[in-house]
Amino acid sequence: MTRPLINLSEPEPEASTDTNWRQYFRFSTDHKVIGIQYMVMSFFFFLVGGLFAILVRAELLTPTSNLFDRPLYNALFTLHGTVMIFLWIIPFNAGLANYLIPLMIGAKDMAFPRLNAIAFWIISPAGMLLMSSFLLPNGPAQSGWWSYPPVSLQTAPGQWLNGQLFWIVSLIFLGISSIMGSVNFIATIVWMRAPGMTFFRMPIFVWSVLSAQILQLFCLPSLTGALILLLFDLSFGTNIFNSFQNGDPIIYQHLFWFYSHPAVYVMALPAFGIFAEILPAFSRNPLFGYRSLALASLGISLISIFVWVHHMFASATPGWMRMTFAITSGLAAVPTGVKTFGWIATIWRGKLHLDTPMLFALGGVSMFIFGGITGVMLASNSFDLHVNNTYFVVGHFHYIVFNTITMAIYAAIYFWFPKITGRMYAEGWGKLHFWLTFLGANLTFFPMHSLGLQGMLRRVASYEPIYQGGNVLSSLGAFLLGASTLPFIANIVASWLQGRQTNNNPWRATGLEWTTSSPPPKENFAEVPYVTFPPYDYGEPRAYGESDPSVNTSD
Ligand code: HEM
Ligand SMILES: [Cu+2]
């Protein structure tokens, strides 16, 4: 009954022996293989989306449009946004959760292993379909990642096979995959927990994924439905949204944002969970306010169902609706503030250890505070109407999607790398990666705010010469960000192949995943764990690694 949560003196389960890399190209139902498949695949898409971003930034180095013609520029920013959301962050989060959730709750696998594999195998064909639209005579979709009608219905008139059609079909399949994932995550967390793993003993990462997936299951069908209707308008001559034929494009906007605002939290909640795992471990403090952080995850999900119209303040939206949604959007800052307060209180007076995962977590939290504040500013109608469709908005949301979420993803990769591979990454290269990313991210996205306040519009390939200074800074930052991925890739590949072997819990973190071997055996645990303690029981703050010679934090 009173077995401690972490007991390294127990016989350790055997590490997985199947080190054959070919297993990652097969149809596997092991959640750990699927998790790695998701993460590696989405990283390739991240590189593709990053390449598009660098091309966009290269075009914007000069006020005139000189590198690409307008359709190609439009296609580049459209596919950049689409790839980064639907093929980088969302699948990466699904992969990380796939790998970690069963380990964190003491389960052998996900609830529906085959559904899990099918959800994964839908994604790359859908991504390839999207990319293949470059081969079409009129190229890929050009209507931005929202695909608002009537613009999305104008592309490639007369061409039945067109980029917009490919975009819609691809997104419908990506949505189906995500819905399969949601069902699986929710069932796993609700039904597959080990004995003693009560809801209020689950790590915050598990709470975050549960909240995100409930939200996704509830809201994503709205986007899928909208896309099917859009497909009818585009290809089968209906006029549901086509305003030139008495259709109603505003309804599309409602259906689109009913999912796509929550999508921000489907992407961000796992990042919040990552912060909650890493900050306690590297400050040797228990997590501050465990229950409020767990409930704040649910609170964020709940509120974010009721804020979507803040993306439509500049559309034909009645005044009462703008007012209501400005208020709900402001309210969203409450549970998010609870989260931020909990993270800061966790590291307060802790003994901070600035290893790479902690650097990325601290960088992500600090930039989230900035991106959160500009978000609250945008919730105000009067301000939003001023900066609507300007680079201020682009700056704001990249502080969330890149500076917070992508930073959190990097933090997670470094933190769980020893668990996933049984090896340690090279700390010096990790730190180099962090500083290049941190500098590059701020250089890229900070100047966008002032450009937007001065009136520079988004989605334009040419601009007034007065905006050039900020654009040059931003483009240099983007090139730096591109370069920053090189030490990362080198480090991960080299360390995976021949990094120093580590023990099962190099960070001395609490949490079930650290009690099993690295990498974990096929069924995760030698025997079903019995959980008696809440997570994050770091006890008294103490020196990190001092009394335990088995702890290695640097290379
Ligand atoms: C690698 C660093 C990145 C750079 C340099 C970058 C740059 C840009 C730029 C310059 C635009 C505006 C294009 C325009 O309006 O003409 C843009 C749009 C966008 N970016 Fe990024 N971005 C980066 C990473 C990301 C990430 C990680 C995401 C994750 C979701 C993302 C999501 C988006 C979205 C959704 C749009 C809007 C596209 C549209 O208007 O349809 N970006 N990005
Ligand atoms: Cu929103």
Image (tube, rainbow, N blue to C red):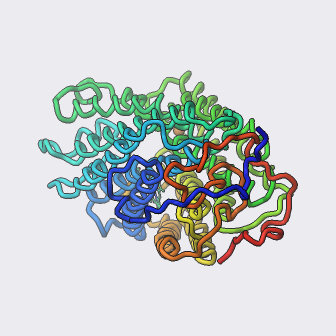
Q: Is residue 217 left or right of residue 344?
A: left
Q: Residue furthest front?
A: 11
- Counting from the top left corner in percent of width and height, residue 361 is at 66, 58
Q: Is residue 406 above or below residue 304?
A: below
Q: Nearer the viewer, residue 308 or 209?
A: 209
The N terminus sits in image quarter: top right
- Counting from the top left corner in percent of width and height, residue 346 is at 79, 51
Query: Exactly how many numbered labels are in the figure?
Result: 0
Q: Residue furthest top?
A: 320
Residue 307 in sight here? yes
Q: Is residue 174 left or right of residue 136?
A: right
Q: Is residue 464 above or below residue 150?
A: below
The C terminus sits in image quarter: bottom right
Quadrant location of ligand 1? bottom left
Q: Nearer the viewer, residue 25 or 455?
A: 25
Residue at horizontal 28 percent and vertical 40 percent from the top = 168
Residue 450 in sight here? no
Q: Is residue 224 above or below residue 16?
A: above
Q: Nearer the viewer, residue 201 or 329?
A: 201
Residue at horizontal 27 percent and vertical 55 percent from the top = 131
Quadrant of the rendered image containing residue 223? top left
Q: Is residue 125 left or right of residue 531?
A: left
- Counting from the top left corner in percent of width and height, residue 446 is at 58, 61
Quadrant of the rendered image containing residue 210? top right
- Counting from the top left corner in percent of width and height, residue 53 is at 41, 62
Residue at horizontal 51 percent and vertical 32 percent from the top = 187
